[in-house]
Image (tube, coloured by chain):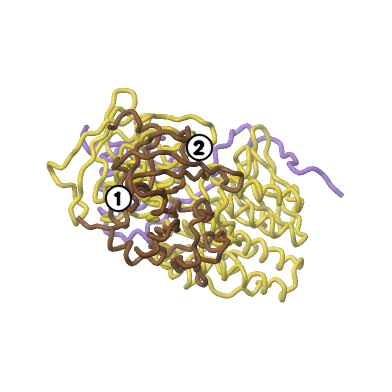
Amino acid sequence: MKDKDIIICRCEEVTLGEIEKAIAEGATTLAEVKRRTRAGMGLCQGRTCSKVIAKLISKYTGQPLKDILPSTFRPPVRVVKLKILGGEESCFLEKQK
Amino acid sequence: MELVEVAVIGAGPAGLAASIEAAKAGAEVVLIDENNRPGGQLFKQIHKFFGSKSHMAGIRGINIATKLLEDCEKFGVKTLLNTVAFGLFEENRIGLANKDKKSILRAKRIILATGASENVLNFPGWTLPGVMGAGALQTMMNVNRVLPGKRILMIGSGNVGLIVSYQALQAGAKVVAIVEAAPQIGGYGVHAAKIRRAGVPILISHTVKKVFGNDCVEGAVIVRLDKKWKPILGSEKKIKVDVVCLSVGLNPLTELAWMAGCKFVYIPALGGHIPIHNWNMESSKKDLYVAGDLTGVEEASTALEEGKLAGLAVAESLGYLKREKASKRKAEIREQLIALRAGPFGELRRKLKEPFMQGDEIRK
Amino acid sequence: MNKGLKFTGVISEEELKRCPGYPSEERFKKGPVAVIECIQEIPCNPCEAACPFGAIEIGEPITNLPVLDEKKCRGCGVCISSCPGLAIFTVDMSYSKTEAVVSFPFEYLPLPKIGEKVKAVNREGRIVTVGRILKIKNSLKNDHTPIISLAIPKKWAAEVRSIVIPQNKKERK
């Protein structure tokens, strides 16, 4: 196995080579790498790979890590079925008093 | 929409401690957790904790969790389990969902105690079944009573790596080696000493080069590193293992804090970007408090103390505690926190947090 | 290669000499005594309160190293299971003419049997001698940290700190 074939984002099966290519083509933020490669778009929403990708961006673009911010978080930040998200609102707490 | 006084997201040590303090003072508290039981990582911690008596030192994590759950019950904390907080919205609204329903909860105060997730290392073969985080190994062994392998390679010698190695030994596995990329052991010497006595080698300046196997882990190649952390050619060693366990640090789970618009600071030694907070554990956003690993990765014992601070501050801001009484109690807890952050292991964390851990005036 | 706890996980001789919880040679000769192998300033102090004779002092801050008052210590071993780091042992050099007794925490199952001959290991986990199990203390107070007392030839008393763990029994000779 070559290094470039190492998977970085396992949810979307994006390899190191693909991420390096995206950065070489001009992606300079996590969001840009995500849009080009889908890395960070899977079930875990980048929880596993974003730190690694941030380091790659920093390595190739020279940006300090502190400036490489996570891509915008939007709801749902956890896995939720669309049926539930779009469905009726219910009460989780028992009425009291 | 439902309205509560205090919503705490995450029922680990920080969330539990925060809920108890706020509820004890009289606030109405709802504690939300995505798991089927509260306690966070505490139920996996079968070892005795460090600290002083007031930190519950000498007590096993699992027993600390039991005690905290009893206190939650005693002070009337309402717990929503199997419930995810999928978003934070305007006016302190929290989106909640369980297996088949959703709800929007509005809280006068929100405490985020979402903890941290594990870092990974990407080497050839890291996606093979048998490569797992230390947390996963702990969950399998200590919660589900399943030993996923018989011969384990541990990557990382921080306290997590050392403790989980010890627990794997207790569960009956062989820990073939612990490799550590740094030129010294990361965790406490006493943890290292007890696994050395059990015959486990700790290889400093070593890392894993690759893991191989057809459908699952069958072995690994480890390699020695030079002073610049570069692999030394020819020093590769093939070892037979069926589990490769990663304990290479944690990453604060900050999604909700980002979504709320909190101000962040980047501190690599605390895990990366963390929300700025004061001694009340209040973030830059009004009514939003943070505690535990998401404010910088530390120990369960520090998470407990931070949780208490957040709980007290919230109770004070809601008028359940007078300024004087709250200040006195918070000062005690600050002392406890400072005690935990002393010495060669904790001092760095204390210094890193100091610049923004300042005043504890309640914001009006 | 650097020596010492930070690099090997094994406390070195020099570190032991400097360790305020390590008894003097004279004290060892007098009979059972606690050996506190704690040399890093970590925030921890349960051993201080555990000692019924006030022989262990940490004070403030709690990162101070435990200091053993070897005159007060009677080698009772109550402190052993109180240590979250499993770093306290007792050694009795006065047990018999030829044998010493080392007591240590042992959190592995199955526990050995009283009278059983077992392989004794040093701080590196290397088998150095064979010992005889004298006693296993495992009351409620131990909270699942049994304390094993092992008789070994005297000359190994400064080295032996545990026995081979169950899963390593077969493989190594």
Q: Quadrant of the C terminus of chain B?
A: bottom right
Which chain is mark 1 on?
Answer: C
Residue linked to disc 1: C155
Decide: marks 1, 2 in contact (CB < 8 A)? no
Q: Residue furthest front?
A: C97
Q: Where is residue C36 shown, x and y percent of the image?
A: 42, 59
Chain that the image shows in yellow = B
Identify the mark at residue B145; answer none if there is no mark. none
Q: Which chain, by letter, is brown?
A: C
Residue C104 in sight? yes
* Tint of chain A: purple
Q: Is residue B231 above or below residue B210?
A: below
**1 or 2: mark nearer the eye:** 1
Q: Chain of mark 2?
A: B
Give the SS element for disc 2: helix
Picture coordinates of residue B108, whole percent (x, y): 71, 59
Q: Secondary structure at mark 1?
A: helix
Front in this rendered view, residue B154 or C119: C119
* Residue B329, placed above or below residue B136: below
Q: In the image, what residue occupies the spot 28% across and 48% down?
A: A23
Residue that numbered label 2 is attached to: B139
Rate crowding at label 2 as few (under 14), some (14 to 19) or many (20 or more) other CA atoms within 10 Å.
some
Indicate the position of residue C158 as horizontal and vertical percent values. 33, 53
Q: CA distance from mark 1 to mark 2?
A: 43 Å
Q: Is residue C108 left or right of residue B179?
A: right
Is the residue marked by circle 1 packed among few (<14), some (14-19), or many (20+) residues within 10 Å? few
Determine if residue B306 is in view.
no
Residue at the (20%, 46%) spot, across then down: B224
Residue placed furthest toward the top: B214
* Type of amino acid under label 2: Thr
Viewer-nearest residue: B111 or A82: B111
